[in-house]
Image: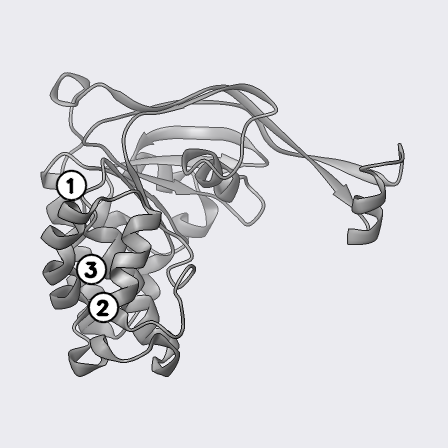
Amino acid sequence: MANEVKTETALGEPIIEFKNVTKIYTLYRSSREQFQALFIKSKKYKRHKALDGVNFTIRKGESVAIIGRNGAGKSTVLKMITGVAFPTTGEVNVRGRVAALLELTAGFSPDMTGRENISFKCYVLGLDDSEIKEIEHKVIDFADLGDYIDQPVRTYSSGMKMRLGFAININTNPDILVIDEALSVGDANFKKKCKAKIKEMIKKDITVLYVSHSKDIQEICERCIYLQKGKVIYDGTMQETLEKYPEFAK
């Protein structure tokens, strides 16, 4: 189980804030109708409210799980924190560098080696040459790919690519670490290694936000936010919130 929840005075300043956030998606029956709607006003669509007046504040150093059934709005929250999506109404404030363990293999160049892809992905994440040089050996050691690190990524298995992606993102010295079911990577030993690294980051006051259906969240997070149909149903300690979530209360 996670450690006792830190008091507000023991935590840093707010690092993530959602203020009355609503997100409405316009859904079309096909990509063709979506394209036509750019030029011709159409009524052939539906509106889906993914988030409905969501409010919460996460402070520096907190470890927070977000739970809920599929369609509860978890992915939309993550997209807003990582800057992929924006609210229809309301305000989202994120302060600091975000490392997102979402699509771990996205952005790799298949013809580059693993080592070359470290530099490539780090540039995409906004790191400069000195920062990349500082963390490269840490990434290589953590991924533990042996001689494959100097082979083209197209020769990697999906598991090897995920290990490299995890190692890159977790070693970029973020202020906020966002995890979406990423601990399914690799074998049991690698999962254990990943969890230990995340716990180490929490001790260094890095904010961790973890979305998962796995009970792994109880090992890592102190606080838990329960979403249902785009609304916050409960926000409290891990134990309190899980007791209100049917899938975990069984």
Q: Which residue is mark 1?
A: 202
Q: CA distance from mark 1 to mark 2?
A: 27 Å
Q: Which residue is mark 2?
A: 115
Q: Position of residue 128 (x, y in %)?
A: 22, 44
Comes first in the chain, label 1 or label 2: 2
Any part of residue 203 in sight: yes
Q: Estimate how packed mark 3 is, as few (under 14), some (14 to 19) or many (20 or more) residues with alpha carbons within 10 Å.
A: many
Comes first in the chain, label 2 or label 3: 2
Disc 2 residue type (three-letter): Arg
Q: Which structural element holds mark 1?
A: helix
> Horizontal placement of 211 versus 218: left or right?
right
Q: Estimate how packed mark 1 is, as few (under 14), some (14 to 19) or many (20 or more) residues with alpha carbons within 10 Å.
A: many
Displayed quadrant of residue 10: top left
Q: Position of residue 1 (x, y in %)?
A: 18, 48
Q: Which structural element holds mark 2?
A: helix
Using the image as rendered, state which of residue 151 and residue 57 is in the foreground: 151
Q: Estimate how packed mark 2 is, as few (under 14), some (14 to 19) or many (20 or more) residues with alpha carbons within 10 Å.
A: some
Q: Is residue 158 above or below residue 33?
A: below
Comes first in the chain, label 3 or label 1: 3
Going 43% across and 60% down the picture, which residue do you hit? 106
Badge 3 vs badge 1, beta-carbon distance below 8 Å:
no
Going 27% across and 71% down the picture, which residue do you hit? 114
Q: Which residue is mark 3?
A: 194
Looking at the image, is mark 1 or mark 2 nearer the viewer?
2
Q: Which structural element holds mark 3?
A: helix
